[in-house]
Image (tube, rainbow, N blue to C red):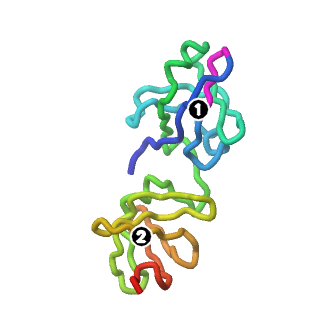
Amino acid sequence: MKQFLEVGKIVNTHGLKGEVKFELWCDDINYLSQFKTLYLDAGGIEALSLISVRSQKNSAILKFSEIDSIDKAEKYKNRVLFGNRNDAKIKKGSEYIQDIIGCIVLNEKTDENYGVVEDVCNFGASDILDVNNGGNHTYIPVIPDIVLKIDTKGRFIKIKPMKGLFDED
């Protein structure tokens, strides 16, 4: 499992004092607010000290101690930021998308292998697993009637396939 996870991207500057407009790739601003440090790399080497986080429409405004002018903020535009998974807590029963990707999807009764989770999407109603089985993609809604168990440590997901999900008929 990756230690440093993408939390979003700096998309623009905000004001003259070095604040940045941030596109959230995590659940919400409350999750992001748990961090004191964010990183410019997936290895957690280049750190930025987070001073404040506030909401602005569908994004956030961030202030870092290292960025105190619009000129400095300009240099960070389009940079992806990472958070150390140990620095924040997620809700009980929740999983990081990064941990779900790569899990094998199995039938809850027969252990039939339906493929590997390649991506997790969300178009509004629920998360959707993009399961790749030899180049064939199946999209599985993450709802209690279908997804029965997600075991990221064991790297598998047990599902109860609904009619039509895998059948061609």
Q: Give the amino acid at mark 2.
A: Thr
The answer to whether mark 2 and mark 1 are in CB contact below 8 A is: no
Q: Which residues are magenta?
A: 16-22
- Which x, y percent locates residue 106? 38, 76
Q: Give the amino acid at mark 1.
A: Lys
- Which x, y percent locates residue 51? 64, 26
Which circle marks residue 36 in the picture?
A: 1
Q: Which residue is mark 2?
A: 138
> In the rendered image, which quarter contains the C terminus?
bottom left
Which circle marks residue 19 in the picture?
A: none
The answer to whether residue 153 is magenta is no
The answer to whether residue 20 is magenta is yes
Quadrant of the image occupied by residue 33: top right
Q: Is residue 144 left or right of residue 152?
A: right
**Residue in the picture at 44% in, 41% down:** 4
Measure the alpha-carbon separation of dots 2 and 1: 39 Å
